[in-house]
Amino acid sequence: MPESPRVAVVRPFRTEDRAAVRRICHVTGFMGEPADWYWSDEESFADMWTGYYTDREPESAFVGEIGGRVVGYLLGCVDSRKAWNPADVGRRHSFHRGLPFRPGTAGMIWRAGRDFVSDVAHRSGTVRGPFLDSRWPAHLHIDILREGRGSGLGRALIDTWMERLRSLQSPGCHLETLAENAKARAFFTTMGFETFGDPAFLPGARARDGSRLHNLVMVRSVHP
Ligand SMILES: CC(C)(COP(=O)(O)OP(=O)(O)OC[C@H]1O[C@@H](n2cnc3c(N)ncnc32)[C@H](O)[C@@H]1OP(=O)(O)O)[C@@H](O)C(=O)NCCC(=O)NCCS
């Protein structure tokens, strides 16, 4: 018998999805590839990038399932002023768990500090904190395992999120991505997001060849 197509289904996040979401965050954390080569500590990585959304605003989180297995998520925040700053979460982990002195995290942490000081000294555009603008008060993070990509799941997750924002009468949504993540940029453009402002250096972030990476803000109005 021919195998039936594996259809992705979007549904609201449930507490029992938390571990899968955290795992997916770490294995897709470098432009869709595993993040462990620059940040080996999954616990702190997941806390920085998913903790607020799963633990404080789970009603804005959605997952994509294939055959009953969670393969991706969209984590949303309606009012970005309320979200935890990932840098603050990282600093808390650093203090309590000694991350600046562990081999899998020390490089990134010290490099980020050096980059930031150098960027400010040279007046280079650098990221100083999360993007906040009342025209696009909401934001999102979206990540899908390789097996779930390219079959409409990303679109379905974004549509579900925009529908929620519409029902809450939010004016708009932004996101931050790496400017070098060409596939994600193309996807977000297809989904109606536009680039806002210039890319800025992201302190500490490097490509595998050692070159610096840039943060890019993209925005989309909720009501056309
Ligand atoms: C980016 C990502 C969320 C997109 O999800 P997806 O399920 O692969 O995308 P979809 O299949 O739903 O595609 C939706 C639309 O975007 C378009 N699109 C997706 N990827 C594209 C690409 N690389 N280039 C051009 N268009 C693209 C599709 O053609 C499709 O258009 P259509 O609906 O008009 O036919 C997913 O690939 C992913 O998780 N990638 C790795 C993690 C990542 O980079 N996350 C973003 C970090 S900010």
Image (cartoon, helix red, strand yellow):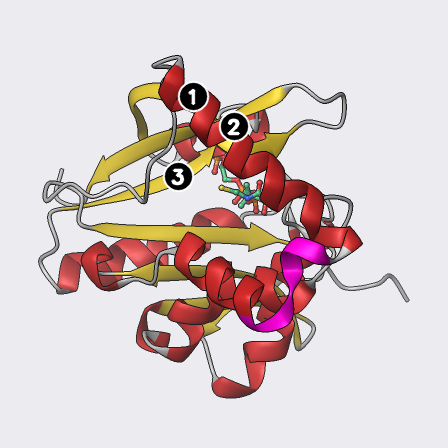
Classify the position of ligand 1 by quadrant: top left, top right, bottom left or bottom right.
top right
Number of other residues with Cα within 10 Å of mark 3, as a class: few under 14, some 14 to 19, many 20 or more: some
Q: Nearer the viewer, mark 1 or mark 3?
A: 1
Which residue is labeled 2 in the image? 115
Q: Quadrant of residue 24?
A: bottom right
- Residue ranking furthest to the right: 1
Answer whether labels 2 and 3 touch (C-beta < 8 Å).
no
Magenta highlight range = 96-101
Which residue is labeled 1 in the image? 119
**Relative to residue 182, is residue 82 depicted above or below?**
below
Cβ at disc 1 under 8 Å from ligand 1: no
Q: Considering the numbered disc 3 on the image, is that residue within a helix, a strand or a loop?
A: strand
In the rendering, at what x and y percent does residue 117 appear? Answer: 44, 28
**Relative to residue 61, is residue 124 depicted above or below?**
above
Q: Nearer the viewer, mark 2 or mark 3?
A: 2
Magenta stretch, overall SS: helix
Number of other residues with Cα within 10 Å of mark 2, as a class: few under 14, some 14 to 19, many 20 or more: some
Answer whether labels 2 and 1 touch (C-beta < 8 Å).
yes
Which residue is labeled 3 in the image? 176
The quadrant in which the C terminus is found is top left
Q: CA distance from mark 2 to mark 1?
A: 6 Å
Q: Considering the numbered disc 2 on the image, is that residue within a helix, a strand or a loop?
A: helix
